[in-house]
Image (spheres, rainbow, N blue to C red):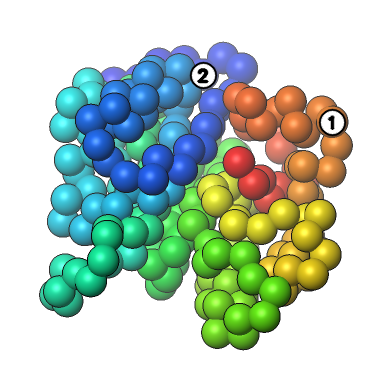
Amino acid sequence: MDSTTLSNGLTIASWNSRGHSDNRIEYMSKIINDVDILLVQEHWHFESNICTLVNKMNDVHVYGISRMDSGVLLSGRPHGGCAFLYSRNLKCNITPVEVGSNRCCAIIIDLSEHARILLFNVYMPCDTEYDQNNHENYVDVLSKISQVRMNYPDILHTIIGGDFNTDFTRRLSLHTTSLEDFIHREGLVNVLSSLAARLFLAMLTVLLELNPPFIISL
């Protein structure tokens, strides 16, 4: 495939689009012109229509999932969904990975023989202090991410980005403790825990030497 040289690494951005209107598509197009991979949440498309996100973009691929079942009559407004947008000119191979959740999608990025990254894009359930069903759904997504990581023990670098729908300062949130436990159990690093990491989120550059893996709330 055609490729460009990634001299300093791989640039990744994340955005919750809250829909797919023309102005939102236009904004996605502007972002993808400046980055290599864009993580999108809440595109509000059925799975069969996700491809339309890039219809007006040049040399851009898309892979994603939908929160909506096309076989069921939609009640209320469209909702949810995650997708990766990435340039066709990347000097790497992108392989979709089945996660088994309609709140998370994943890809493997093969940058070279010795540099592979497992990249997740999440749109988690809304934060809660009392809704146990909601919390169980949250924990279920984290469990599925853990399982995918176990399925690829040879991949040393993991990045989890997207919309986690919680905040580490919300000590009463049921999600906060579960997310912190997940980070610790999986040997991940919360990049929000340092000033450098906050600046890092403005335009994430994933250097090939990345180690240990990271969890990133973008």
Q: Which mark is residue 195?
A: 1
User: Tag 2's secondary structure?
Assistant: loop
Can you name the residue that lies furthest to the front here? 76
The residue nearer to you, when weighing 16 against 85, is 16
State the residue at coordinates (16%, 56%). Answer: 48
Q: Which image quarter holds the C terminus?
A: top right
Count neighbours of disc 2 (C-alpha within 10 A) and say few if under 14, some if 14 to 19, many if 20 or more: few
In the image, is 202 to the left or to the right of 95?
Answer: right
Residue at which label 2 appears: 6
User: Tag 1's secondary structure?
Assistant: helix
- The answer to which quarter of the image holds residue 89 is top left
Q: How many marks?
A: 2
**Relative image position of residue 21 (x, y in whole percent):** 25, 36
Can you name the residue that lies furthest to the bottom here? 132
Give the residue type at disc 1.
Leu
Q: Determine if residue 98 is in view.
A: yes
Position of residue 81 relative to residue 134, above or below, is above
Distance from disc 2 to disc 1, alpha carbons, whole Å, reads: 26 Å
In the image, is 22 to the left or to the right of 191?
Answer: left
Give the residue type at disc 2.
Leu
